[in-house]
């Protein structure tokens, strides 16, 4: 596989968009997170497996997966439909404009796809811009620096499918 691969357009996100618009995702604030690479405050969630705060080496089902099981089921359904590799975690971001960073804790490939009623905020990987609106972009986020353009207008949700070690 090339460094970056973009998949075909797939509009399977309408139901998930409606679900997200009915709930309030938690604020993810820089002050409460380590290694966040100067990310701005944003609303987001982690679905699937994650490490508990007690630094256990055991992966457990995330708080958000338990709180919103209908959303978790829909995210996994979409992942099985569009993601060509195995994953165990999904990061959800609402209107996040990511600064330049690497996903230090991810293992292997990541797949990013965005959807919503928005324009702009493309992902840039290896100095090449990709429009991920309903068109998944696959790359190794732990090895390749990436960021979003800062021209977001509207409401954008992003899903990042990845493997949590």
Image: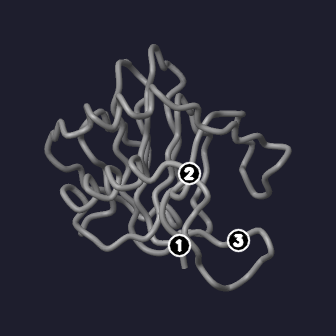
Q: What residue lies at 40% left-to-right and 59% top-to-bottom?
A: 161
Dot 1 or dot 3, earlier in sequence: 3
Label 3, secondary structure: give it. loop
Indicate the position of residue 78 as horizontal and vertical percent values: 26, 52
User: Disc 2 to disc 3, how far (Cα)?
Assistant: 15 Å
Residue 30 image-quadrant placement:
top right
Q: Distance between the residues labelled 1 and 2?
A: 20 Å
* 69 versus 119 height, above or below: below
Q: Earlier in the sequence, mark 1 or mark 2?
A: 2
Q: Identify the residue under disc 2.
A: 67
> Residue at 53% across / 72% down in the picture?
164
Q: How crowded is mark 1: few (under 14 residues within 10 Å), some or many (20 or more)?
A: some
Write down the residue under mark 3. 52
Q: Quadrant of residue 43?
A: top right
Query: Which residue is pictured at 56% across the width and 33% down the height?
Result: 96
Relative side of 32 to 59, left or right = right
- Residue at 38 percent of width and 19 percent of height: 118
Q: Looking at the image, is mark 1 or mark 2 nearer the viewer? A: 2
| Residue 165 horizontal/vertical position (percent) | 55, 79
User: Which quadrant: the N terminus?
Assistant: bottom left
Q: Is residue 86 left or right of residue 33?
A: left
Count neighbours of disc 3 (C-alpha within 10 A) and say few if under 14, some if 14 to 19, many if 20 or more: some
Instruction: Estimate the x, y position of residue 163 in percent, counting from the top left.
Output: 46, 71
Kindly give the residue lying farthest to the right in the view shown. Answer: 31
* Helix, strand or loop at mark 1: loop
Is residue 135 placed above or below 108 in the rendered structure? above
Question: Mark 1 or mark 3: which is in front?
Answer: 3
Residue assigned mark 1: 164
Which of 75 and 28 lies nearest the eye of the viewer? 75
Label 2 Cα neighbours within 10 Å, binned few <14 / some 14-19 / many ≥20: few
- Sooner in the amino-acid sequence: mark 2 or mark 3: 3
Locate residue 160 relative to residue 96 in the image: left or right: left
């Amino acid at each position: 596989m090339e460094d970056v691969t973009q998949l075909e357009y797939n509009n399977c996100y309408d139901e998930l968009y409606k679900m997200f618009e009915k709930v309030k995702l938690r604020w993810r604030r820089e002050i409460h997170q380590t290694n966040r690479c100067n990310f701005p405050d944003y609303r987001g969630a982690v679905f699937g497996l994650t490490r508990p705060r007690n630094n256990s080496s055991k992966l457990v089902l995330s708080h958000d997966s338990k709180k919103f099981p209908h959303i978790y089921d829909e995210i996994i359904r979409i992942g099985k439909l569009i993601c060509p590799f195995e994953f165990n975690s999904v990061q959800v971001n609402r209107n996040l404009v990511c600064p330049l960073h690497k996903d230090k804790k991810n293992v292997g490939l990541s797949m990013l796809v965005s959807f919503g009623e928005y324009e702009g905020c493309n992902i840039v990987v290896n100095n090449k811009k990709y429009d991920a609106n309903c068109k998944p972009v696959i790359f190794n986020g732990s090895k390749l620096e990436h960021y979003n353009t800062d021209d977001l207008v509207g409401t954008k949700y992003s899903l990042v499918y990845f493997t949590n070690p």
